[in-house]
Amino acid sequence: MSKQKVVVGLSGGVDSSVTAMLLKQQGYDVVGLFMKNWEDDDNDEYCSSKQDLIDAVSVADKLGIEIEAVNFSKEYKDRVFANFLEEYQAGRTPNPDILCNAEIKFKAFLDHAMGLGADLIATGHYAQVRENPINPGEFQLLKADDGSKDQSYFLYRLNQAQLSKTLFPLGKYLKREVREMARTAGLINHDKKDSTGICFIGERPFQEFLQRYLPKKPGEIKTPEGKVVGQHDGLMYYTLGQRQGLKIGGSRDSNGEPWFVAAKDMQTNELIVVQGHEHPLLLNDGLKAGQLHWISDKVPETNWVYAAKTRYRQPDAPCEIDKFIKEEVEIHFGQKQWAITPGQSAVVYESNVCLGGGIITSAF
């Protein structure tokens, strides 16, 4: 019987490298695929794709597996980046990692891998897939055992067809164990710094990057009472709950509390700011979300306690799905949530099973 062929997304980082190594040890026929998703500023100090490719090739060589480089820049620009700019222009704060996973890593990449004769694909995400023990044939997305690294939030838009073809070998390991395995195996990237977000953004000054595509549209920064406390460069450069970069530190009132973005008025082009992390305008009881996606065919029940995250790295918050109205869902939380942000995703869990979620349209 021939071995199952797995195509691994090799990024040049330690996680995908250990993924390939583990699968080879488990007896799979492993092939590496390096994805290039951005080429507008290849020579930019913030884009590490050239070094990443060198590292990926070095790891493939060390593991004795083949590697291919494929360019998905056009698909990325059309399917992910265009939406990213559209959302910012509309005053929302999108999460490009979520769209990138749904459209590139588990669509363009999956299609390409199947064209290479793969049986399965694998990535270095910290998450788990299993067949539902109660409903065989249905696949579930589970949280990783390492709660501090769990990436199921970014994967909630995956469907049954995608999950049925996907392996997440790192789901049962702690990050420090992954680095130790890489070090023991002599992989050159065992202590390579984790990438922060998508290559094209990296750790670059974000507003400066956005200004290349969305020109400035200055306006006033006001308090809820209407007092002008500063000037902004354009509402698209700010997000709810933002504290840094407001440039109004000198106009604090006597209480000395820092300023936070509480709202954006698109009609008047005004940025509304408040003082203090716990200001009532930053605290929400619930949200509405659209563009819903549920991983199984079963839609979550209303009036049942689930847990949800409205941003990555946030602790699970107990909630109830109050009602479905057309293509939207209303979620109520047991405790007020901080700075729920339109454009971000609300992802719903039942214990450690990710059920799916939607894009936040508003908070209340």
Image: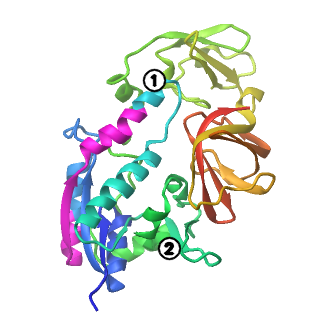
Quadrant where the N terminus sits is: bottom left
Residue drawn at x 50%, y 73% as measured from the top left: 173
SS of the residue under disc 2? loop
The answer to whether residue 67 of the structure is visible from this angle is yes
Quadrant where the C terminus sits is: top right
Q: Which residues are magenta?
A: 57-84
At label 1, the amino acid type is Gln
At label 2, the amino acid type is Tyr
Residue closest to the eye, 322 or 14: 322
Please name the residue that numbered disc 2 is placed on: 173
Asked if labels 1 and 2 touch by Cβ distance under 8 angstroms, the answer is no
Q: Nearer the viewer, mark 2 or mark 1?
A: 1
Query: Residue 109, how many percent across, how many down?
Result: 31, 58
Residue drawn at x 55%, y 70% as measured from the top left: 138
Q: Residues within 10 Å of mark 2 (few under 14, many from 20)?
A: some
Query: Residue 87, how many percent across, how many down?
Result: 47, 30
Q: CA distance from mark 2 to mark 1?
A: 40 Å
Position of residue 306 relative to residue 206, above or below, is: below
Tell me the colour scheme of the image: rainbow
Task: Describe residue 155's horizontal placement relative to residue 339 as left or right.
Answer: left
Residue closest to the eye, 26 or 221: 26
Residue drawn at x 69%, y 22% as measured from the top left: 274
Please name the residue that numbered disc 1 is placed on: 89
Q: Residues within 10 Å of mark 1 (few under 14, many from 20)?
A: some
Residue closest to the eye, 58 or 137: 137
Query: Residue 306, how many percent across, how many down?
Result: 73, 56
* Mark 2 vs 1, N-terminal side: 1
Q: Quadrant of residue 17?
A: bottom left
